[in-house]
Amino acid sequence: MTARHTHTCPVAATLNVIGDHWTMLILREAFYGACKFSEIQRNTGIARNLLSARLTHLVGEGVLEKTSGSRPLYHLTKRGRALRPVLVAMTQWGNDHLYGAGNEPVALLDAVSGEKLAPAVYQTTSGQPVRPEDIRARPGPGASDATRRRLERAKQC
């Protein structure tokens, strides 16, 4: 479905799974609790043939599971639920940068307390806070030589 990348990159690999806007809207619906084909189609406006292809892709990638029956249901798998921070970040970014304070179309709240979510906080493995602008990408243990060269060149900018 999506073009496969030939270099080692977690962003590219993730985009191979979830990288088109229809797929993200399908995932949004799954996070909101929609599980029926007709419900997802109605809420996204996607054409039926595209929805069918995207759902098949997400099931094949292990992001959704499909129940059997005359009217199958689609549910997030553990792998799919692990994408929640991606959707939360996109929602917060859209609320902040596209709609602005007081105009947020979707409020993200803690299910227990009802409090609004704060922006994500990043920290080191030892618990030290890190500002987003202080995060750097460096080659990991699975990096290819091309990735190592690319990240080394990027350090110079």
Image (cartoon, grey):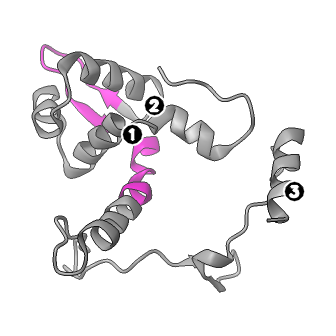
Badge number at residue 77: 1
Where is mark 2, residue-wise?
62
Q: CA distance from mark 2 to mark 3?
A: 33 Å
Q: CA distance from mark 1 to mark 3?
A: 36 Å
Please tell me whether mark 1 sits on a helix, a strand or a loop.
Answer: loop
> Three-letter amino acid code at disc 2?
Gly
- Residue 96 percent across, percent down from the top left: 32, 73
* Front position in the image: 7 or 88: 7
Q: Please give the name of the residue rendered at 81% of the width and 44% of the height, measured from the top-left corner.
A: 147
| Badge 1 or badge 3: first in the primary sequence | 1
Residue stretch in magenta: 65-87
Number of labelled discs?
3
In the rendered structure, the answer to whether residue 124 lies left or right of residue 149 reads left
Badge number at residue 152: 3
Q: Are marks 1 and 2 in contact (CB under 8 Å)?
A: yes
Q: Is residue 80 magenta?
A: yes
